[in-house]
Amino acid sequence: MSCYDDLKQVLKQNPKVWLVTGCAGFIGSNLLETLLRLDQRVVG
């Protein structure tokens, strides 16, 4: 199991609220999509 898999499992069990600035950019939009796939709440 990779570190990323461990992190995904922890985030699924304990969702958080994330503030992402720059959601219209390349990195921000990809981060936003990944967090939403992990059932996280995102503000940005």
Image (cartoon, rainbow, N blue to C red):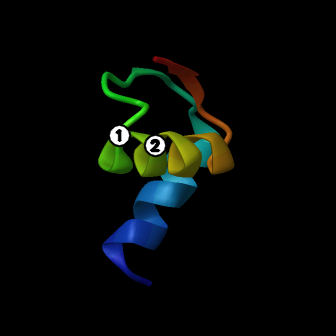
Q: Residue 12 vs residue 42: left or right?
A: right
Of 1 and 41, which appears nearest the observer?
41
Residue 5 in the image: above or below residue 14 = below
Q: Say what secondary structure mark 2 lies in.
A: helix
Tell me the residue that label 1 is attached to: 25
- Residue neighbourhood size for the residue with mark 1, other residues' Cα within 10 Å, grouped as few (<14), some (14–19), many (≥20): few
- Residue neighbourhood size for the residue with mark 2, other residues' Cα within 10 Å, grouped as few (<14), some (14–19), many (≥20): some
Q: In the orientation shown, which residue stands out farthest toward the bottom?
A: 1
Q: Residue at x 42, y 32 (%)?
A: 24
Q: Is label 1 in contact with label 2 (beta carbons under 8 Å)?
A: yes
Residue 43, numbered label: none
x%, y% of residue 31?
Answer: 42, 46
At label 2, which amino acid type do we have?
Ser
At label 1, which amino acid type do we have?
Gly
Of 3 and 34, which appears nearest the observer?
34
Which quadrant of the rendered structure holds the N terminus? bottom left
Q: Say what secondary structure mark 1 lies in.
A: loop
Q: Residue at x 32, y 27 (%)?
A: 22
x%, y% of residue 12?
Answer: 62, 46
When asked about the image quadrant of residue 21, the answer is: top left
Q: Residue 1 vs residue 3: left or right?
A: right
Give how far apart the Cα atoms at labels 1 and 2 are.
6 Å
- Please state which of the two labelled residues, at mark 1 or mark 2, is closer to the viewer: 1
Tell me the residue that label 2 is attached to: 29
Q: Residue at x 51, y 25 (%)?
A: 16
Residue 7 in the image: above or below residue 39 = below
